[in-house]
Image (cartoon, rainbow, N blue to C red):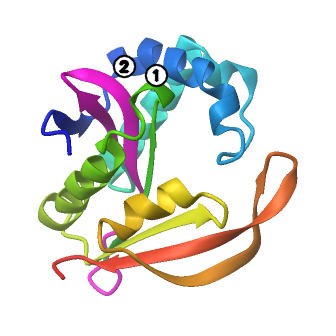
């Protein structure tokens, strides 16, 4: 475990570093993430994306965070699809860690930290996530944060040139 792992809300000034990480890791992430337009990998594209994420944060539908190790941005952790209504109160967790900082416990710690944000700051009751069936490292991160798989979404995401099944995960917060 890395005690130096922290999370904070994303900032416009994070755009260049995120773009550099994403450009460097294009091949590493290809099996796990949908294809992105070329401008996604530029500082300008990331600046626009961050602006949209922060607008979503202001609207209460997303909590966009960055993952830090020794005060350096090494990835992102985001709660999307937030449904704050009293009878729903849930959000979906997504995350990535740049390849040079993987396998050091940062993703596990970042997900644990964002679960606290979901419960304490956002007042959510349920955390959800999804992984491709093949993404065993991400599944380990979720299991180590007390998520349980609850179903398969068949042919639900287009990754690396074909439709893939997704494994659906859940955790009731406060448990």
Q: Quadrant of residue 117?
A: bottom left
Specify whether 98 is left or right of 41: left
User: Closest to the observer: 98 or 84?
Assistant: 98
Is residue 124 toward the left or the right of residue 167 in the image?
left
Q: Are marks 2 and 1 in contact (CB under 8 Å)?
A: yes
Residue position for label 2: 14
Q: Position of residue 55 (x, y in %)?
A: 39, 39
Nearest the viewer among 56 and 5 is 5
Q: How many marks?
A: 2
- Mark yes or no: residue 110 visible: yes
Q: Position of residue 80 (x, y in %)?
A: 43, 56
- Residue at position x 15%, y 33% in the image: 4
| Majority secondary structure of magenta residues | strand
Say which element carries label 2: helix
In the rendered image, residue 74 lying in the magenta stretch gets the answer yes
Quadrant housing the C terminus: bottom left
- Asked whether 3 falls inside the magenta stretch, the response is no
Q: Which mark is residue 18?
A: 1
Choose top left, top right, bottom left or bottom right for residue 118: bottom left
Residue 64 seen in the current view: no
Residue 126, given in percent of the width and then of the height, sits at 32, 77
Q: Residue furthest right?
A: 161
| Residue stretch in magenta | 65-88
Q: Nearer the viewer, residue 87 or 67?
A: 67
- Looking at the image, which residue is at 39% across and 38% down? 76
Label 1 Cα neighbours within 10 Å, binned few <14 / some 14-19 / many ≥20: many
Question: Residue 2 vs residue 111: left or right?
Answer: left
């Amino acid at each position: 475990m890395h005690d130096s792992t922290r999370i904070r809300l994303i900032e416009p000034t994070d755009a260049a570093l995120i773009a550099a990480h994403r450009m460097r890791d294009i091949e590493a992430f290809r099996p796990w993430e949908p294809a992105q337009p070329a401008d996604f990998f530029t500082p300008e594209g990331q600046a626009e994306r961050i602006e949209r994420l922060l607008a979503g944060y202001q609207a209460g539908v997303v909590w966009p965070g960055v993952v830090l190790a020794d005060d350096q941005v090494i990835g992102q952790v985001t709660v999307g699809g937030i449904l704050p209504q009293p009878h729903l109160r849930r959000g979906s967790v997504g995350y990535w860690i740049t390849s040079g900082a993987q396998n050091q416990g940062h993703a596990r710690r970042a997900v644990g930290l964002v679960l606290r944000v979901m419960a304490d700051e956002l007042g959510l009751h349920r955390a959800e996530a999804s992984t491709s069936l093949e993404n065993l490292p991400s599944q380990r991160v979720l299991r180590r944060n007390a998520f349980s798989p609850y179903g398969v979404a068949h042919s639900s995401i287009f990754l690396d040139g074909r439709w893939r099944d997704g494994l659906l995960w859940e955790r009731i917060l406060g448990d």
